[in-house]
Image (cartoon, coloured by chain):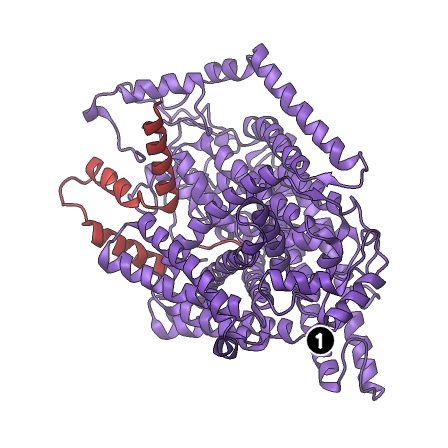
Chain colours: A red, B purple
C-alpha cells in the first residue's frame, strides 16, 4: 500500500465511523435489490434517516 | 421495549440445532466462492505455531508479566504510568486471543455460512451490513461515554492497584463476555432487544421484572450522570458558558445537515469542533468579565434546573435538530480525545506516587465514596469493567449491522476491551495528581466546608502517608485551571479534568495552556453526558409508552404528541427529582448517590448475564455454562451484598436506613443540628433523601433477585430436559463473505480475493467501500 492509499483508507474508516457512508451503503443496497424504482435522493435519505430515529431512538451509553 | 420487529421465521427446532455446522439448510450457492472459511483451513492456520508467532506471544506475555510485577510487587516511591498501559494492553491481547477464542469455539460456535440479520433482513437503513472496522468504531462510540471516565477516578481513593486489577481482569472475564454474548444472541435473533429476549427466555414474570428494572435503572443512571455535570459546572462561569454554547452549535449543525449540505457529517463535525474550541476560548474571556460572572456564574441548583428543562425540550424536539448533530460532535470528540490522551500518556509517562493499596481500602469511612473495598470497589467502577448498560446497546443497533457471524468476537469482546482501556487511562490521569489535592477536590462540602482552609485542615487531618497539603497548592491550582475554587468539586469529572490538563500541558502548551485543557476536558465530559441524558430520556420514554400501552392502547402510538409529552415529562420528573435531591443533599450528593449508580449498572449486568445463561442452557451447552455463570455469580454477590449493606449497614456513612433513622431520632429529640446537617430543614432533607435512596436500593435488589431466580429456574429446567426450545431465527444461507478480525489472515485474504475476482453481475449486494 502506498502512503496515499493508506491515507485514503484512514479517511474512509473515519468517515465510516462518523456514519457518513450511510447513504452510499443505501445506494449499494438499492442497486442490488429493487432496481425498478429510483433511489431516494441524498437529501431525502438523510431526512428519512433522522425521522426514523425520531420513532426508534438509539441508546447512548454512560 | 421500543422494538416491535418480530421475526415470523423462528427456528423453533430441537435443542442443539443452533450449533451451526450440521444444519443442512445451509446449502452453499455453487456459483459463489465459499461464504465461510473452511473450518479445517481455519483450524490449521490458527493451530500452526510458527517460531515467529510463538516469539510474539512469549514477548507479549513477558512484557505483560513484567508490567504487572512493576505495578503489584515492586514497591518504590513512585510507579510510572507506562506500566499501567503495558499491563493492560498485553493482558487484553492475551485474553482476546485465547479466552474470547475459547468462548467462540466452545460456547457460541458462530457459523459464517449463516446469513446475519444485516444480510437476510437487509433494508439498506437499519439492517445494513457494515464493514467490521467501521462497525467496531460505531459500537465503541455507542458504549463508551462518561462512565469509564468517572468511576475509576472515585475508586482511586483505595489506591491504584485494586482499581487496575478490577478494570483489567473484570473486563476480560465479565464485561467483555457479557457484551459478546448479548451481541451474539441478539444477532441470532434478528437483532432483538434485551427486554424481548428476557421475556422469551424467562417468561412473563422474569421479563416484566427485567423491563421495570431497566426503566428504573435508566432513570437513576441519567440522574447521576447529570449530577456529575452539575458538580463540574457549579460556580464556574467559564464552564457554564462553554457547555451552554454546545446547544446553539448543535442547532446550527442540525440545520446545516438538513438544509445546506445533507450527509456531510465529517465536514459539519469539523466545523462544530472548531466552534467548540472557540466557545472554550471565549469562555475564558467571559469568565473574567463582571457581566459574564453575573450571567453564567450559576449555583448548582440553577444549573440542575437548567439541565432538567433542557432534557425535556431535547427529548421532544425532532432528532435532526439537536440529538443527531450533538451525537456526531460527541463521537468526533470521543475518538479524537481518547487517541490524544493515549498518545500524551505514552509520551509524557507521568510518575504516580499514590500507594498501591491505600488506607481506605479496608475502612468504610473513605471521604470520596464510603464503604470497604469489597464490595464497593466493584460498584464504584462499573463502566470499564462490567457495564450492564452495554447490554442495551449490544442488543440494539449493532447486531443489525454485523456482516458475518464470526465478527462478533472482534466487535463485541474487542469493543469492550477498548472501553476498559479508556477506564485505565482515566485512572492514570486521576492518579497523576497530588493525593492531597485529590482528596480536597473529592471530599464533600460537608467535610471541607467548601473553603481552602477547611479543605487543608480536613485532608491533612486524615493522616494519609505522603500527604502534606498547603493552602497555596489549592489556590495555585484553581488559578491555573481558571476556576474560583477547586475545593469539593466532587463527581470525578473535575478531578479527571485536572489530571488530563496536567498531562496535556506537559505535552502541548505548558502551564499557560492548563486552563484551556481543563475546560476542554470538562466540555467533552459534559458533551458525552448531555448526549446520554437526551438519548436516555428518549429511550426511556419509548419504553414507558410501550408499557403504559399494555393498559391504555393509545400510548402505543409513538407519534401521538400528547402521549409522548406526558411520558417524557414523567421520565424527566423521575431523574430530575433525584438530581435535585443529589444537588441539595446536605451529606454531599454524589458521595451518597454514586454507589446507587454502580449498583444499578451491575444489576443490569446481572440481568443480562442471567438471560445469557438461560439461553446457553437451552442450547444444551451445559459443559460451558460457567462462562456466563461465573461473572453472573460474581456480579450477583457484589451487587446484592452492596445493596444489603446500603440497606442494612449500621454504619451511617454506608447504610441509607441507618442514616435515615439517626436523623429522624435527632429530629424527634428536638435537636437543631445533627452531623453534617446544620439546620432542621437540612435534617429533614437527609431524612427524605435517605428514605428515597433506601427504597430505590430495595427495589433494585428485589427486581434483580426475581430476574436471577427466574433465570436459574429456566436453566435448571433446561438441564433436566437436556436443553429447551431454541428461540433463534431460522438459519438462512449467506451469500457474502468478509474476514472476521481487525486484520485478515492469510487464508481469509485468499478467500477475499476469490470474491473480489467474481464478475460484477454475479456479485451479491455488499456494503462497505
Which residue: 27% across, 59% down?
B256
Quarter of image, res B236: bottom right
* Image-based side of B274 in relation to A45, left or right: right
The answer to whether residue B329 is above or below residue B33 is below
* Image-based side of B410 in relation to A41, left or right: right
* Image-based side of B50 in relation to A60, left or right: right
Q: Is residue B576 visible?
A: yes
Give the letter of the chain under mark 1.
Answer: B
Quarter of image, res A55: bottom left
* Image-based side of B762 in relation to B244, left or right: left
| Residue receiving disc 1 | B586
Q: Is residue B320 visible?
A: no
Quarter of image, res B322: bottom left
Q: Residue B643 in the image: x percent, y percent?
A: 72, 59
Q: Which secondary structure lies at badge 1?
A: loop
Q: Nearer the viewer, residue B424 or B465?
A: B465
Amino acid at each position: 500500500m502506498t502512503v496515499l492509499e493508506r491515507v485514503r483508507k484512514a479517511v474512509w474508516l473515519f468517515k465510516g465511523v462518523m456514519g457518513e457512508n450511510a447513504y452510499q451503503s443505501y445506494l449499494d443496497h438499492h442497486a442490488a435489490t429493487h432496481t425498478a424504482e429510483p433511489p431516494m435522493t441524498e437529501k431525502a435519505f438523510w431526512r428519512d434517516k433522522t425521522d426514523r430515529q425520531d420513532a426508534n431512538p438509539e441508546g447512548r451509553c454512560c | 421495549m421500543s422494538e416491535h420487529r418480530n421475526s415470523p421465521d423462528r427456528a423453533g427446532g430441537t435443542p442443539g440445532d443452533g450449533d451451526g455446522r450440521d444444519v443442512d439448510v445451509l446449502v452453499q450457492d455453487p456459483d459463489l466462492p465459499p461464504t465461510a472459511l473452511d473450518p479445517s483451513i481455519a483450524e490449521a492456520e490458527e493451530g500452526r505455531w510458527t517460531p515467529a508467532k510463538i516469539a510474539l506471544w512469549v514477548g507479549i506475555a513477558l512484557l505483560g508479566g513484567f508490567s504487572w510485577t512493576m505495578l503489584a510487587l515492586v514497591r518504590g516511591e513512585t510507579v510510572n504510568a507506562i506500566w499501567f498501559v503495558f499491563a493492560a494492553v498485553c493482558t487484553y491481547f492475551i485474553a482476546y486471543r485465547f479466552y474470547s477464542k475459547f468462548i467462540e469455539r466452545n460456547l457460541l460456535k458462530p457459523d459464517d455460512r449463516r446469513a446475519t440479520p444485516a444480510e437476510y433482513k437487509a433494508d439498506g437503513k437499519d439492517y445494513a451490513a457494515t464493514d467490521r472496522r467501521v462497525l467496531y468504531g460505531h459500537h465503541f462510540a455507542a458504549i463508551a461515554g462518561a462512565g469509564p471516565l468517572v468511576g475509576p477516578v472515585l475508586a482511586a481513593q483505595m489506591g491504584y492497584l485494586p482499581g487496575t486489577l478490577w478494570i483489567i481482569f473484570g473486563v476480560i472475564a465479565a464485561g467483555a463476555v457479557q457484551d459478546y454474548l448479548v451481541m451474539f444472541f441478539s444477532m441470532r435473533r434478528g437483532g432483538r432487544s434485551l427486554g424481548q429476549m428476557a421475556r422469551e427466555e424467562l417468561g412473563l414474570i422474569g421479563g416484566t421484572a427485567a423491563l421495570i428494572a431497566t426503566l428504573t435503572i435508566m432513570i437513576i443512571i441519567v440522574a447521576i450522570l447529570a449530577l456529575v455535570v452539575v458538580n463540574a459546572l457549579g460556580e464556574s462561569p467559564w464552564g457554564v458558558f462553554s457547555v451552554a454554547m454546545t446547544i446553539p452549535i448543535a442547532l446550527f449543525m442540525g440545520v446545516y445537515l438538513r438544509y445546506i449540505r445533507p450527509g456531510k457529517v465529517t465536514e459539519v463535525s469539523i466545523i462544530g469542533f472548531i466552534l467548540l474550541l472557540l466557545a472554550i476560548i471565549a469562555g475564558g474571556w467571559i469568565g473574567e468579565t463582571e457581566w459574564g460572572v453575573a450571567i453564567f456564574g450559576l449555583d448548582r441548583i440553577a444549573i440542575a434546573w437548567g439541565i432538567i428543562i433542557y432534557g425535556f425540550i431535547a427529548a421532544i424536539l425532532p432528532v435532526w435538530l439537536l440529538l443527531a448533530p450533538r451525537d456526531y460532535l460527541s463521537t468526533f470528540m470521543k475518538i479524537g480525545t481518547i487517541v490524544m490522551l493515549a498518545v500524551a500518556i505514552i509520551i509524557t509517562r507521568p510518575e504516580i506516587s499514590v500507594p498501591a493499596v491505600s488506607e481506605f481500602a479496608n475502612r468504610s469511612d473513605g471521604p470520596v465514596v464510603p464503604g470497604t473495598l469489597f464490595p464497593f470497589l466493584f460498584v464504584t467502577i462499573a463502566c470499564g469493567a462490567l457495564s450492564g448498560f452495554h447490554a442495551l446497546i449490544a442488543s440494539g443497533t449493532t447486531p443489525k449491522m454485523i456482516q458475518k457471524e464470526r465478527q462478533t468476537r472482534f466487535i463485541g469482546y474487542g469493543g469492550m476491551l477498548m472501553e476498559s482501556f479508556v477506564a485505565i487511562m482515566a485512572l492514570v490521569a486521576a492518579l497523576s495528581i497530588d493525593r492531597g489535592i485529590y482528596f480536597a477536590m473529592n471530599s464533600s462540602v460537608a467535610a471541607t466546608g467548601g473553603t481552602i482552609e477547611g479543605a487543608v485542615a480536613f485532608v491533612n487531618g486524615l493522616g494519609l502517608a505522603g500527604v502534606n497539603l498547603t493552602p497555596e497548592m489549592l489556590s495555585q491550582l484553581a488559578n491555573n485551571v481558571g476556576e474560583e475554587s477547586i475545593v469539593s468539586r466532587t463527581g470525578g469529572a473535575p478531578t479527571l479534568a485536572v489530571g488530563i490538563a496536567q498531562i496535556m500541558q506537559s505535552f502541548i502548551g505548558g502551564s499557560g495552556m492548563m486552563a484551556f485543557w481543563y475546560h476542554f476536558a470538562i466540555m467533552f465530559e459534559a458533551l458525552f453526558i448531555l448526549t446520554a441524558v437526551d438519548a436516555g430520556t428518549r429511550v426511556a420514554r419509548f419504553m414507558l409508552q410501550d408499557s403504559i400501552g399494555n393498559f391504555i392502547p393509545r400510548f402505543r402510538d409513538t407519534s401521538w404528541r400528547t402521549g409522548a409529552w406526558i411520558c417524557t415529562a414523567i421520565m424527566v420528573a423521575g431523574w430530575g427529582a433525584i438530581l435535585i435531591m443529589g444537588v441539595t443533599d446536605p451529606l454531599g450528593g454524589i458521595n451518597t448517590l454514586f454507589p446507587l449508580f454502580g449498583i444499578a449498572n451491575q444489576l443490569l449486568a446481572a440481568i443480562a448475564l442471567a438471560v445469557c445463561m438461560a439461553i446457553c442452557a437451552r442450547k444444551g451447552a451445559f459443559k460451558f455454562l460457567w462462562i456466563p455463570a461465573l461473572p453472573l455469580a460474581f456480579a450477583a454477590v457484589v451487587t446484592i451484598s452492596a445493596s444489603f449493606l446500603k440497606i442494612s449497614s449500621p454504619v451511617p456513612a454506608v447504610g441509607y436506613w441507618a442514616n435515615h433513622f439517626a436523623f429522624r431520632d435527632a429530629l424527634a429529640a428536638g435537636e437543631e443540628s445533627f452531623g453534617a446537617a446544620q439546620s432542621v430543614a437540612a435534617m429533614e432533607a437527609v431524612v427524605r433523601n435517605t428514605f428515597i435512596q433506601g427504597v430505590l436500593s430495595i427495589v433494585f435488589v428485589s427486581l434483580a433477585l426475581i430476574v436471577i431466580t427466574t433465570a436459574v429456574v429456566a436453566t435448571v429446567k433446561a438441564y433436566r430436559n437436556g436443553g429447551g426450545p431454541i428461540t433463534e431465527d431460522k438459519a438462512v444461507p449467506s451469500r457474502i463473505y468478509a474476514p472476521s478480525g481487525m486484520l485478515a489472515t492469510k487464508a481469509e485474504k485468499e478467500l477475499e480475493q476469490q470474491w473480489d475476482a467474481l464478475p460484477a453481475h454475479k456479485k451479491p449486494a455488499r456494503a462497505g467501500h
